[in-house]
Amino acid sequence: MHFLRCFIILFLIYIALQINLCLPSIPSSLKTLPIAGHFDFEHVHHAAKDFGNRYSFLPLAVLHPKSASDIATTVKHISHMGPGSRLTVAARGHGHSLQGQAQAHRGVVINMESLQGSKMQVHTGNFPYVDVSGGELWINILHETLKHGLAPKSWTDYLHLTVGGTLSNAGISGQAFRHGPQISNVHQLEVVTGKGEVVSCSEKQNSDLFYSVLGGLGQFGIITRAQISLEPAPKMVKWIRVLYTDFATFAKDQERLISVKNTFDYIEGFVMINRTGLLNNWRSSFNPKDPVQASQFKSDGRILFCLELAKYFNPEEMAVANEEVTSSLSELNHIPSTLFQSEVPYIEFLDRVHVSEIKLRSKGLWEVPHPWLNLLIPRSKIHSFAEQVFGNILTNTSNGPVLIYPVNKSKWDNRTSAVLPEEDVFYLVAFLTSAVPSSRGSDGMDHILSQNRRILESCERGGFGVKQYLPHYSTQGEWRSHFGLQWEAFVQRKSTYDPLRILAPGQRIFQKAT
Ligand code: FAD
């Protein structure tokens, strides 16, 4: 017995030594790679953090690449390390993931923002586009393209995110009903695959890789450059909010607006339930010139639905824009006394969430845990969903905004990796909650997570055919059911472009082959 115990202890010591002897040699082999950028083996803590503030996995090293070739050299080296190595690679955009998706436990994180050195190039002409680094922030692209009177067509609500980060998901905002998500507005990509190859791809060239990577959760390659479609940029925006007490009327107006041609340029909406505090106003940076702000409307305990609209215009076309807005608004069925309007510069409208970010940061409310839940819900089920969730499972929206707006599936390309509900119109419903770390109350993590669970269970029970956006699962079975019929193709693409399963381990879809 004694002998057996000694043997087991010695064996465990041997294994521990093997692990310890093996691991330090990995970073040192990286040190000798012929790259123009550099590895950092000490300051790696930043790469173990993200906006979600819930998961933290320390990498062994952070690569600050100067070029796509630095990334290719690193990925190729790691892919040649053989099956014994557990080293994985995560591209990190701006680290605004929610559940560690851009992290790599004891792996290599690539700081994509270091790639920004290569200049943005704006191409004018009939089909204008901008050629940018995969690590570029959308806010910088906006500033640069505006110098040419142009701007991307499709946005996210918050612009301090990278091109590679949003194109790996979809990039959805109030323009998506017309232009599709950001992944529908890309001409070409340059990608480093999991084999370390640098490949240009587009609809015409290496199209399977192109569509794999768009919405591909970082699984097939690292986007090092992208050509983003542009349109003439307006100077000004009419920013409008109207309120409803009845969900059916609100949804009917939203759906009508996204189905007609001559309509607004941006259509979103949000829910207000017993709102208090600053957090729920974080997207409400509305022009203070307004006599009464929409978000302060007294609802007498009722649930309110706010339709948010924007019409782009240039000062010289003001009269026409006014006429079009008046005509479109006259067809809506909102509470008549609740029309809130302001006119703001285009750039101010697009960068509106950043204003709230600054306010929240100053109060220590930005870097808190964010247990967000984002759902895509088929049109036919949105009424049942609203009935079960708003006012029942969700009894206040004080912990952060709840967005709700429909988009047209016809504007999405079904060759991408993005996973969508079955119907032609579906709603994005985003519960953008913030948690107070030590609270046990309704703003605490436990309460919010249990609320999220109840929402998901209610969707499951109702057979709503809901898909998660920015999905997060812990088992492969759950991923399989998320992808549904697309699962086999997703796995096939993985084995083609990243056969050793090196890339984006933080998504927890695949484990590195050992
Ligand atoms: P990261 O968090 O750094 O990375 C996300 C994933 O993409 C990771 O798996 C990472 O490995 C991978 N990745 C990163 N860069 C690359 C690359 N170059 N090539 C390949 N893979 C890469 N989303 C919307 O669609 N609409 C919104 O309106 C919206 N609003 C938001 C508002 C806020 C305040 C926040 C925090 C997020 C919002 N998001 C929105 C979600 C956002 O689009 C995603 O979280 C996105 O991933 C963040 O981009 P990032 O650059 O920080 O990516």
Image: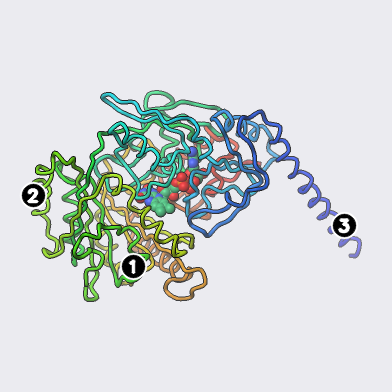
Say which residue appears at 12% left-offset and 65% top-offset: 337
Does the rendering let one see residue 415? yes
- Check if mark 2's residue and mark 1's residue have beta carbons within 8 Å: no
- Give the camera-side residue of 35 and 74: 35
- Given the image, on which type of amino acid does mark 2 rest? Ser
Q: Secondary structure at mark 1?
A: loop
Pick the front one: 31 or 418? 31
Residue 143, position as x, y percentages in the image: 36, 39
Element on which disc 3 rests: helix
Q: Separation of disc 3 and disc 2 at Cα?
A: 84 Å
In this orientation, which residue lies closer to the viewer: 266 or 232? 232
CB at disc 1 and ligand 1 closer than 8 Å: no
Residue 7's tag is: 3
Left or right placement of residue 43 versus residue 6 in this view: left
Q: Residues within 10 Å of mark 2 (few under 14, many from 20)?
A: few
Left or right: where 4 falls relative to 420: right
- At label 1, counting other C-alpha atoms closer than 10 Å, the crowd grade (few under 14, some 14-19, many 20 or more) is many
Query: How far is mark 2 from mark 1, CA to CA?
Result: 32 Å
Mark 3 and mark 1 lie on one chain; the one further toward the N terminus is 3
Residue type, mark 1 in image: Thr
Q: Which of labels 3 and 1 is toward the front?
A: 1
* Mark 3 and mark 2 residues within 8 Å of each other at the beta carbon: no
Q: Earlier in the sequence, mark 3 or mark 2?
A: 3
Q: Which residue is mark 1?
A: 397
**Residue to which mark 2 is pinned:** 327
Q: Residue 101, image x and y in percent?
A: 51, 49
Q: Earlier in the sequence, mark 2 or mark 1?
A: 2
How many numbered marks does the figure carry? 3
Q: Amino acid at mark 3?
A: Phe
Where does the image place residue 309, in percent across and percent down from the top left?
A: 21, 52
What is the C-alpha distance between the residues marked 3 and 1?
A: 59 Å
Q: Is residue 121 above or below residue 163?
A: above
